[in-house]
Amino acid sequence: MKKVRYLNCDEKKREFQSSELVKSFAHLYGFEDKLLAFEVKDFLHDYLNDALFNEIESVNLNRKVLEIKIKSPLLKNDFRMRKTFFLNKFKEQFPDADFSDLQIL
């Protein structure tokens, strides 16, 4: 039988969601850009189908410039042709992030 502990309102315990905790560590240790790049990559995983997503090698953020490295020349060309569309999509999805440009490598 499991014991259940009920917390009183008087106890001062603060609960964090895991995302809040990760964000606070990222802020402390200065890798917020890398965390945002992971979030963009997760968004691309949801947005693209698996075959297209597997062609994305890496996503990085350097000095407000989002860099996406793509293996496939066809997908690379498609991203370059729709660069403004994707940049606007990322800005819409991540309003707190201040992306200045998108580079397809």
Image: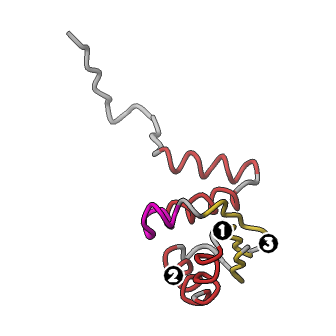
Task: Name the secondary structure under disc 2.
Answer: helix
Q: As shown in the figure, which amino acid type bears the numbered disc 2?
A: Lys
Q: Is residue 70 magenta?
A: no
Q: Which numbered mark, 3 or 2, is in the foreground of this view? A: 2
Say which residue appears at 70% left-offset and 76% top-offset.
Answer: 104
User: Which x, y percent locates residue 91?
Assistant: 56, 80
In three-dimensional space, the C-alpha distance between marks 3 and 2, rounded to whole angstroms, equals 19 Å
Residue at the far top: name it: 1
Which circle's residue, 3 or 2, is located before the other in the chain? Answer: 3
- Position of residue 85 relative to residue 34, above or below, is below
Residue tagged by mark 1?
Answer: 70
Residue at the image position 72 percent from the left and 67 percent from the top: 61
Q: Earlier in the sequence, mark 1 or mark 2?
A: 1
The residue positioned farthest toward the right in the image shown? 63
Q: Are marks 1 and 2 in contact (CB under 8 Å)?
A: no
66 to the left or right of 5: right
* Quarter that holds the N terminus: top left
Q: CA distance from mark 1 to mark 2?
A: 18 Å
